[in-house]
Image (cartoon, rainbow, N blue to C red):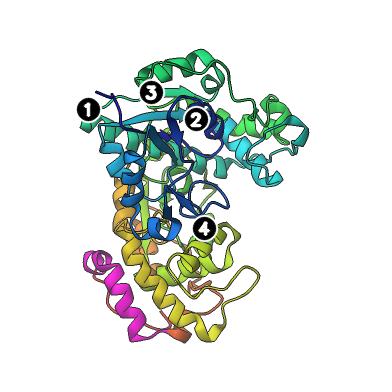
Amino acid sequence: MAKFDSFVILAEMRTGSNLLEAAVNMLQDVHCHGEAFNPVMIGYPNRHEILGISKEERDADPKSLWKAIRKAPGLNGCRYFHEHDPRVRDMILRDQKCAKIILTRNPVESYVSLEIARATGQWKLGDAKGRKTARAAFDAEKFENHLQTLQNFQILIMNALQVTGQSAFYIDYEDAQNVEVLNGLANWLGLEDGPDSMPANMVPQNPEPLEAKVENYPEMEASLARLDRFNLSRTPNFEPRRGPNVPGFIACETEHSGLLYMPMRPALSDQIQVWMAQIGPLVESFSQKTLRQWKRQHNGHRSFTVLRHPLMRAHLAFDAVLERQSFSETREVLRTTYKLNLPKPGQRLPAADYPDVLEAFIRWLKSNLNTQTSLPVSPLWASQSALLQGFSSFAAPDLLAREEQLADDLAYIAQAAGIKAPRLAVDGGDSARIKLADIWSPALEKAARESFTRDYMQFGFGDWQRGQ
């Protein structure tokens, strides 16, 4: 009886998954079908189907593709990254007959490699003569977001394996280039023969040391020095577990007290930071370790976050999807897979069409928040209930301030910390190109209530009021 009837390579971008897949495909009767559940493509760029199942059929019923992979002749599997379709994740992780191959890489190396790939447009290399070169610019905030994403995914995997009593085959980036390790993987899979050599058509893209690949290497060293170095060790033992977005927290301090702002995006951070800077110096880019230290040093501190109306948050999130280059793939998936009337690349959404498309987007959010779509839930439109739950895994805020009475709430939290509150300059908070006050309708409100039912109930929101 076969040990496994399928496998999954649990990895991330720039961890060596292309190389590992090529090596796995060298094994007899073993077939890896690429990024089978990538929302933007099916398997590989320019591929339209896997095992007779089209991208459209997969998007409508992703479990049908996984069932086809399991039933295909030989031992079949795919690569799965954290941003792939969440609807099949639990089914794959809990499947005891699915072999879990967990591929990891030093997070700094994977971050730098990712930045170089984005700069060059080269995502895999078959021959060194075709190599494109660039140097990465290290950005501390982007790296910490990258690190937290890796940690959260590895914690999720580890917990799923623990509760189902499974083990996995852990393999590091360097190990993926070792024939003896790959033979061990073949043996663990229950195969008789392993590879004799590495794939000849795949080579590492950036073999130089980090110092040669990062243009601001001294700045990177200084940024990494404040992190607990053990957070950069191989998985699954990433510590500490980071539910909240601690690097996004902002503090201001006085000699004996301080305030800590825990933003929930889309946030009012600019005007709040200006207000906090009048109290005392701002402190940013926390790790959990440095935030604990800050709290110990400021015994009278108070923390707060700001609740915003769900319709306003959905409106601002939609504006970000329309305007930001980082959401280009999300726009494409929403337009082609979910048939939202979004503009094609190079075009802009006409103002007259904005309300209808915004309503369609908010209705799509209901499915997304229930993990019924191929795209993961973005922090920009996650429910505030869920974001607060994440904060509470580290520390709950002392105050849930309200956007519509922000000046009074901030004056209260400052007084509680023994701080004289400066005046808050309120600018309305709607930074979108098209203002919600100009397009509000009962239909938009109804869509928001249906998508964010828990937030309306949990925090007592009524209808959004124009001009608030």
Measure the alpha-carbon separation of dots 3 and 2: 17 Å
Place of residue 362 in the rendered image (x, y in percent of width and height, measured from the top left): 38, 71
Query: According to the image, label 3 marks what residue?
Result: 169
Quarter of the rendering containing residue 364: bottom left
Image coordinates of residue 31 in percent, x first then y, are 45, 34
Percent x, y of residue 353: 50, 83
Amino acid at the residue labelled 3: Phe
The residue under label 1 is: 165
Of residues 448 and 332, the one nearer the viewer is 332
The residue shown at (64%, 39%) is 138
Quadrant containing the C terminus in the rendered view: bottom left
Q: Is residue 25 left or right of residue 460?
A: right
Residue 309 in view, yes or no: no
Q: Secondary structure at mark 1?
A: loop
Quadrant hosting residue 395: top left
**Cα distance between the residues tagged 3 and 4:** 46 Å
The answer to which of 437 and 249 lies nearer the viewer is: 437
Residue annotated with mark 2: 25
The disc labelled 4 sits on which kind of residue? Gln
Residue under numbered circle 4: 273
Q: Nearer the viewer, mark 4 or mark 2?
A: 2
Image depth: mark 3 or mark 4 in front: 3
